[in-house]
Image (cartoon, rainbow, N blue to C red):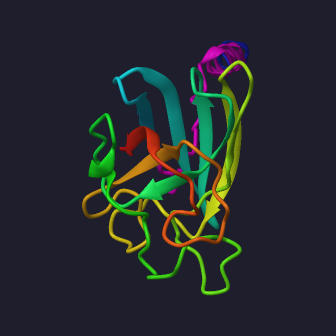
Amino acid sequence: MSLIIISLLVFVGGCNFFEKKEKKVEVNANSAQTATAKVIGKNNESYGNAYFQEEDNGVRVTLALSGLPSGTHGIHIHSVGKCEPPTFESAGPHFNPTSKEHGKDNPKGYHMGDLPNLEVGEDGSVDMNFLAEGLTLDKNAANSLLGGKGTSLVIHESEDDYKSDPAGNSGARIACGAIQ
């Protein structure tokens, strides 16, 4: 009898060996918020996408663009999430929730929508990323790219001088993408 009981215990124990064990995967409830902008030109042509991801100190901006005029261009966040070609004036002024003046070299501050100049290669392409400090994708924050009327990413025809208010002498708006 004990031989039968021992055999049954080994058999039952062996069955447990072949059972599938469930792996529990932890989900990060605080996963980073993201947004995108489809960047278009004055004739509604597509230049590609801009991607935005929340980080601890701001929003990481990644640009994957092509077909732009080569050279250095000012690029800014504007205060309205609307891009109506050909002039993109619908995007409003620079995003400026702190009421500062324009340009990182301006002693009176800088707009939260001021970004580093965009370097477009001879082939018209851009593959660039940078951190836009102080911004967020939290819709309830004053410095949010997704709050209120939304915001847009605007590319200008010329280089931003980083000091002249209100737009760094960067010229006409040549491309725009509503951030969503």
- Measured along the vertical axis of the image, is residue 154 above or below residue 57? above
In x, y percent, where is residue 131?
Answer: 67, 56
Q: Furthest residue to the bottom?
A: 108
Say left or right for 146 vs 75: left
Query: Is residue 99 visible in the rendered structure shown here?
Result: yes
Report the magenta residues as a range.
6-34
- Which residue is depicted at the point 67% across and 55% down? 116
Q: Using the rendered view, name the quadrant where residue 145 is placed.
A: bottom left
- Which residue is depicted at the point 71% across and 19% down? 6
In x, y percent, where is residue 136?
Answer: 49, 63
- Which residue is depicted at the point 52% across and 65% down? 135
- Asked if the magenta segment contains residue 13, the reply would be yes
| Residue in the foreground of this view, choosing between 50 and 67 | 67
In x, y percent, where is residue 56?
Answer: 63, 65
- Asked if the magenta segment contains residue 60, the reply would be no
- Measured along the vertical axis of the image, is residue 147 above or below residue 104? above
